[in-house]
């Protein structure tokens, strides 16, 4: 790990933390990670005991609104200090205006290759969180035109995080640019789990499916078997199994690792996989050992599910620093469980920023732009950020 030197005169740099500072060169790509996919305006209801029965009305104890879909991954990456670009389609309604403002101005995500379409409304998703899971209802239309070509118009990036169903024919072109491709995949609603879907993995550096997806595509019965099958297809294979932890094999370094999940009380699981994937991208670009990458990703995703909203629940470095200082203090006070956790996450002592960073925005009950006016950044995300939701 590297020593971090903070120049108090460069106040604009205090808004976040750059964990890749030691790896940057003057001739490197302008972006660390580029991602693409559909964008949604998410309205989240949390604290439900269950889904409502036909004709029944239930009241939720929590509510939040935030950019969703691919915004979950882009925001997670940006909050971890990655210079992030997003290629997606926006409508021209109030939802789109608000999401553009949040992603571009609050999260500092490069939207230069994204498109605004006239007379097109944003896709809307209502997510209902209950019993540690969620149910969703979405209304959306296909974009007026494909955004595949926009990927090649975007600023170059060291890595790209893309769903296997996206990016059309541009996998090869991105790789030939020197971009490391990190692939994910969604649940196959058809139930076929056609292995031909995995064909673009020949261009990819990493694949990060969850256990159900990995086992179905590899025709295996256990995550440990699935990750070994996938390791034959990509240099870095990672399989996540929720509370069961995560498994990974990095063929480029010869490492294998398992990481147990960090136990937390989950409020909203939306976007946890995106936070995990963004953490893996960061750790890989930073050259961290495989076990460190898995532990950091597990911690980051566990912090996300404790708040409402996918994108705006993603942790920033202030959240991570607060967690580490709390665990370290508890360990020093004789808490045996905290002592074991502090041992496993001791690498954070060399990673977390020692200077003040901005608070990050959390999901709100309203998306009104006027709500920005009363917000001022605080010392750290975990202590001074706005409340999660109404």
Image (spheres, rainbow, N blue to C red):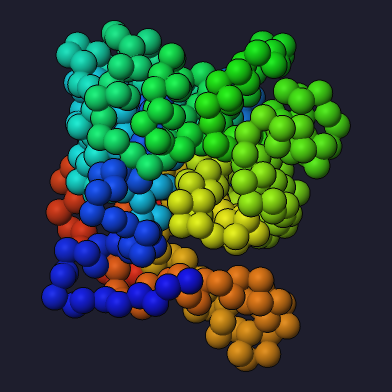
Picture residue at 40% right of the left edge, 47% below the top: 77
Residue 48 vs residue 357, the one in the foreground: 357
Q: Is residue 306 visible?
A: no
219 versus 272 height, above or below: above
Picture residue at 55% right of the left edge, 36% below the top: 205
Residue 128: image location, x then y, percent: 54, 34
Please state if 5 lies on the left or on the right of 231 as rendered.
left
Residue 173 vs residue 119, the one in the foreground: 173
Please state if 333 lies on the left or on the right of 84 as rendered.
right
Residue 154 vs residue 144, the one in the foreground: 154
Please state if 94 lies on the left or on the right of 244 as rendered.
left
Picture residue at 71% right of the left edge, 76% below the top: 340
Picture residue at 18% right of the left edge, 42% below the top: 369
Please state if 314 lies on the left or on the right of 344 as rendered.
left
Q: Is residue 30 visible?
A: yes
Residue farthest right in this picture: 221
| Count of residue discs | 0
277 versus 170 height, above or below: below
Residue 246: image location, x then y, percent: 69, 48
Q: Quadrant of residue 33?
A: top left
Residue 62: image location, x then y, percent: 47, 47
Residue 97 vs residue 183, the one in the foreground: 183
Residue 189: image location, x then y, percent: 64, 15
């Amino acid at each position: 790990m590297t020593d971090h030197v903070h120049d108090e005169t460069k106040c604009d740099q205090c808004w976040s933390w750059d964990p890749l500072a030691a790896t940057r060169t003057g001739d490197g790509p302008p972006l660390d990670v580029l991602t693409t996919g559909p964008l949604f305006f998410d309205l989240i209801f949390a604290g439900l005991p269950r889904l409502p029965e036909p004709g029944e009305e239930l009241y939720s104890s929590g509510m939040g609104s935030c950019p969703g879909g691919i915004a979950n991954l882009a925001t997670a990456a940006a909050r971890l200090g990655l210079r992030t670009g997003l290629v997606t389609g926006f409508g021209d309604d109030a939802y789109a205006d608000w999401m553009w403002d949040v992603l571009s101005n609050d999260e500092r995500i490069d939207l230069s290759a994204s498109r605004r379409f006239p007379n097109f409304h944003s896709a809307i998703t209502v997510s209902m969180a209950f019993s540690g899971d969620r149910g969703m209802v979405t209304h959306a239309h296909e974009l007026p035109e494909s955004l595949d070509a926009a990927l090649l118009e975007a600023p170059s990036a060291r890595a790209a995080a893309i769903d296997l169903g996206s990016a059309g024919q541009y996998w090869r072109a991105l790789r030939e640019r020197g971009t490391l491709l990190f692939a994910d995949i969604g649940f196959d609603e058809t139930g076929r789990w056609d292995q031909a879907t995995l064909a673009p993995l020949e261009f990819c550096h990493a694949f990060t499916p969850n256990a159900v997806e990995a086992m179905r595509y590899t025709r295996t019965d256990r995550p440990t078997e699935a990750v070994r099958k996938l390791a034959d297809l990509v240099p870095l294979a990672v399989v996540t199994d929720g509370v069961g932890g995560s498994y990974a094999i990095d063929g480029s370094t010869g490492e294998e690792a398992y990481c147990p999940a960090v136990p937390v009380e989950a409020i909203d699981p939306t976007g946890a996989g995106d936070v995990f994937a963004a953490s893996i991208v960061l750790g890989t670009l930073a050259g961290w050992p495989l076990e460190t990458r898995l532990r950091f990703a597990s911690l980051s995703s566990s912090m996300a599910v404790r708040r409402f909203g996918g994108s705006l629940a993603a942790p920033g470095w202030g959240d991570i620093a607060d967690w580490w200082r709390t665990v370290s203090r508890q360990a020093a006070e004789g808490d045996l469980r905290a002592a074991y956790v502090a041992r496993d996450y001791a690498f954070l002592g060399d990673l977390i920023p020692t200077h003040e960073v901005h608070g990050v925005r959390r999901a709100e009950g309203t998306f009104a732009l006027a709500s920005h006016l009363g917000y001022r950044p605080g010392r750290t995300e975990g202590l001074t950020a706005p409340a999660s939701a109404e």
